[in-house]
Image: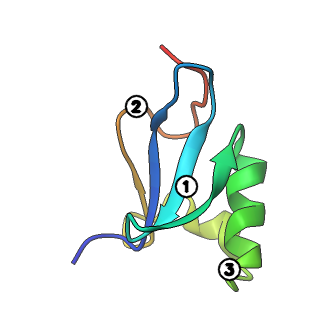
Amino acid sequence: MSAPIIVHRPSPSGGRRVTVRDDQILGLAHSDKDVVEFLRRAGLDDAEALLDDPRWVEWRGGRAHEYEAA
């Protein structure tokens, strides 16, 4: 089973789309702080601890924690 939270590749203008299971968009993150806030709003209180847990968050198309376009 894949992680429920997906942080997608950086967009050309910067930022990364964050989704739940690829279909529910939580927002466009420009930092880890943004991702934590999206997850908190989705009901995950300990969201910061989940960022590096591959059971919860999958980082696609770029290095984890990097938000600028290549």
Residue 29: give x, y in percent of width and height: 67, 45
For the N terminus, the image quarter is bottom left
Kind of element beneath mark 1: strand
Residue corresponding to mark 1: 18
Q: Earlier in the sequence, mark 3 or mark 1?
A: 1
Q: Residue at x 44, y 45 (%)?
A: 8
Direction from residue 1 to residue 51 in the image, left or right: right
Q: Is residue 17 above or below residue 68?
A: below
Quadrant of residue 13 in the image?
A: top right
Q: Spot the residue most to the top.
A: 70
Q: Position of residue 58 (x, y in %)?
A: 39, 57
Residue at x 76% of width, y 76% of height: 41
What amino acid is at disc 3?
Ala
Q: Given the image, on which type of amino acid does mark 1 rest?
A: Val
Which comes sooner in the sequence, label 2 or label 1?
Answer: 1
What is the number of callouts on the image?
3
State the image quarter where residue 54 is shown: bottom left
Residue 38: percent from the left, percent from the top?
71, 65
Residue closest to the eye, 46 or 23 = 23
- Within-10-Å neighbours for mark 1: few <14, some 14–19, many 20+: many
Badge 2 marks a residue whose secondary structure is loop
Instruction: Tell me if residue 44 comes above or below residue 68 in the rendering.
Output: below
Q: Using the numbered discs, state the Cα–Cα distance from disc 3 to disc 1 in whole angstroms.
A: 12 Å
From the image, tell me which residue sits under label 2.
62
Report, in whole angstroms, how far the alpha carbon at label 2 lies from the one at label 1.
13 Å
Which coloring applies here?
rainbow
Based on the displayed image, in which of its 4 quarters is residue 31 positioned? top right
Kind of residue at disc 2: Gly
- Labelled disc at residue 42: 3
Mark 2 surroundings: few (<14), some (14-19) or many (≥20) residues within 10 A: some
Q: Residue at x 26, y 71 (%)?
A: 2
Q: Residue furthest left?
A: 1
